[in-house]
Image: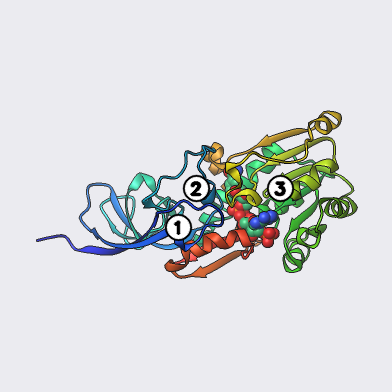
Amino acid sequence: MNAPSFVNRQWFYVKRPEGRVGPEHYELRESQLSAALAHNEVIVQAHYFSVDPYMRIQQHQRDTYDVPHPLDIVQQGGVVGRVVASASERFAEGDWVYGYNGWQLYAKCHANELTKLDPAQAPVTTALGVLGMPGRTAWFGLMEAGRPRPGDTLVVSGAAGAVGSLVAQFGKRAGCKVVGIAGGADKCRFLTERLGLDAAVDYKAFADVEGLAAEIQRVSGGVDVYFDNVGGRVTDAVIPLIKRRARIVICGAISQYDGGLDTPDLAPRFLQHMLFQRATIQGILARDFLLRMPEMVAQVAPWVKNGEIVFEETLVDGFEQLPAALGSLFEGRNLGKLLVRA
Ligand SMILES: NC(=O)c1ccc[n+]([C@@H]2O[C@H](COP(=O)([O-])OP(=O)(O)OC[C@H]3O[C@@H](n4cnc5c(N)ncnc54)[C@H](OP(=O)(O)O)[C@@H]3O)[C@@H](O)[C@H]2O)c1
C-alpha cells in the first residue's frame, strides 16, 4: 500500500526582477508530498513565513554575500510550523519548530535542520523576529560593531522595522540617546511613544539631503553611532554629522534593493571626513554570528518574557500573499517584523 501524502503548495521563484519584486516573479505550484519517512525525518506544516529584504538582494545579478538566487527553485526563507509526522525521537506530532524550509506549506526535513520552540517561553513567531535572525542582527550589530557607551548618541535608520526597532531599544538599554529615522508620521509616533526614543525624524518629509541632515543634526546634536539599514540619501544625510571616533554600522541598504545593487554605489565621498573624525565603518552579517545565537537569546529572551521590549509584528494573512508581501517591504507597509500566516 502507498504511504499517504500531503497536498503541498510551493512558491517557485521563476523570473528575475529588474525593479520592484512582485507576484509576477513567482509561480504557485501544487504537488504531493509523500508521508513516508526515513529515520530522523520530520514533516513540518508551515504556519508563519518570514518575509525579509535579503530575499530581494539574492535576486540581483551580481554576487553579494550570496551567489544570485537561481531560478525555478522554491523561495528560501525561515518558517515556524508544527510537526505533522515524525520518525525522530526528538520531535513529536504537534511540536512547534523553526526551520529554514522556504515558501511551502509542507516540508520534509532532517531533525538536525529543526529547532524546537517552547510556546510557554515566548510566542512562537518570535523565532522569526526578536529571538531569531533580526534579533541576532540587531544585538551583535549594535553591541559588537556599534560599541554603544552610556551618553552616546545613536542614530538608527529603518528604525520602525524588524531590525531597526530592536537596535533602537537595545541602544536605549545601553544608555544612549537614540534618534530613529523612519518614513511617515505614524511610524515616528511609534518610535517616540511606544519605543520611548528621544526623537524621531520622518525622512519622507524632506525633499533634499541638506534639509534632512539639518533636522537630524537639530534633534541629535551629532552622531556617535550610526546603525544603517537603508543607505541612499538617508545615509548621505547622516554621515557628515558623525562625531569624533564615531562607529558606522552598515547592516543594510534597502533603498538600493529595487535593482540598484547591480549598478555602482554612487554617493558623496566621505573618506576624508572619516579621517578627520577617526571614525570606523563596519559591515555586519547575521550569519557570522549564528554560532553565538545562544548568547543573544540568553540576554534578550528574559526581556521578551517580562514585556520589557516591544517586538511589533505585521501579520499578512494567506499563503497566496507571500510575493506581494515581499514587494510591500519596499513600500514601508510593515511596522516591525513582517510575517505571512498560512
Ligand atoms: N546584515 C545582515 O545580516 C542583515 C540581517 C537582517 C536585515 N538586514 C538589513 O536590515 C534592513 C532592515 O531589514 P528588516 O528585516 O528589519 O526590514 P524592515 O526594516 O522590517 O522592513 C523594511 C523597511 O525598510 C524601509 N524602507 C523601504 N524602502 C526604503 C527606502 N527607499 N528608503 C528608506 N527606507 C526604506 C521601510 O520603512 P519606512 O516606512 O521607514 O520607509 C520598510 O518598512 C534591510 O536593509 C536588510 O537588508 C541585514
Q: Can you give x and y, in whole percent of width and height, for residue 320 in the image?
A: 43, 68
User: Callout 3: few (<14), some (14-19), or many (20+) C-alpha neighbours within 10 Å?
Assistant: some
**Residue depicted at x 75% and y 46%:** 235
Label 3 vs 2, first from the N-terminus: 2
| Residue at the bottom extreme of this rendering | 317
In the rendered structure, the answer to whether residue 303 lies left or right of residue 40 reads right
Q: Specify which label sits upstream in the sequence, 2 or 1.
A: 1
Task: Provide the residue designation for mark 2.
Answer: 59
Q: Is mark 3 within 8 Å of ligand 1?
A: yes
What number is the disc on residue 9?
Answer: none
The CA distance from mark 1 to mark 3 is 25 Å
* Disc 3: which residue: 232
Residue 318: % across, % down: 45, 70
Q: Are marks 1 and 3 in contact (CB under 8 Å)?
A: no
**Percent coordinates x, y for residue 118 in the rendering:** 46, 58
Disc 1 target residue: 25
**Disc 1, SS:** helix
Q: Report, in whole angstroms, how far the alpha carbon at label 2 lies from the one at label 1.
A: 10 Å
Q: Secondary structure at mark 2?
A: loop
